[in-house]
Image (cartoon, rainbow, N blue to C red):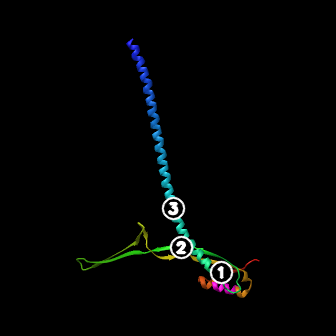
Amino acid sequence: MNFKRILQKLNEDRKKAIYYLLILFLCGVLLILIGDIIVKLNTKKVNNIKNSVEVNTNSNIIATSASFEDKVKKDLIDTLSQIQGVGKVSVMIYFEGGSESVPALNINDTNRKVEEKDSQGGVRTTTEISKNENVVLINEGGTSKPYIIKQVNPSIGGVIVVAEGAGNSEVKERILNSVKTVLNIPASKVSVMPMKK
């Protein structure tokens, strides 16, 4: 009888043990899922930060170039519209290339000349030339940036001016001369057309 009782007790303990093992297994699965979700969220945050930095950097470069081009166009329209007889003006400017920043460079040139005399009285001359260029960096807001000494704007490839008064040859000539002068380009790069009514 004791044997039956022992088997019965083991059976009850086995059910409890399986129950506890099942709970332990489910807790482990839950912890793994929570850990995976946290890792994915952190990865998304890092990627979003990287993307926003790239977008901001690129938009600053584009904004600098676009603002120069927009300013040239706006100034040209403002100037041409003030010429007598021109009337309403529309301008299209084709820019070749983009803006370029020229950083300051720290240049170290070394010239070394060595003369050696051999036992027969001959002289051998060796010249060593080395050049080392480093971009000059400045600290701005905790980050290092190149020190820009010059901003090279894109060159103008062509200009089209459409004006109300361009049908008059005298006004057309004034527009052409003004554009050539203000943008420092040859007449072959400027086209002046009358505006449709």
Query: In the rendered structure, which disc, 2 or 1, sits on the residue that comes first in sequence?
Result: 2
Label 3: state its secondary structure: helix
Q: How far across and how far down the image is residue 3, in percent? A: 39, 14
* Residue drawn 41% across the image and 23% down it: 13
Label 1: state its secondary structure: strand
Amino acid at dot 2: Ser
Is 144 situated left or right of 114 in this image? right
Query: Which segment is the magenta one?
Result: 172-178
Label 2: state its secondary structure: loop
**Label 3 to label 1, Cα distance in Å?**
38 Å
Amino acid at dot 3: Glu
Query: In the rendered structure, which disc, 3 or 1, sits on the residue that comes first in sequence?
Result: 3
Quarter-of-image position of residue 126: bottom left
Amino acid at dot 1: Val
**Label 2 to label 1, Cα distance in Å?**
22 Å
Mark 3, other Cα within 10 Å: few <14 / some 14–19 / many ≥20 = few
Quarter-of-image position of residue 133: bottom left
Q: Main secondary structure of the magenta part?
A: helix
Which residue in the structure is indicated by mark 3? 54
In this rendered view, identify the residue nearer to me: 84 or 169.
84
Which residue in the structure is indicated by mark 2? 99
Q: How far across and how far down the image is residue 183, in percent? A: 59, 82
In this rendered view, identify the residue nearer to me: 181 or 29.
29
Which residue in the structure is indicated by mark 1? 190
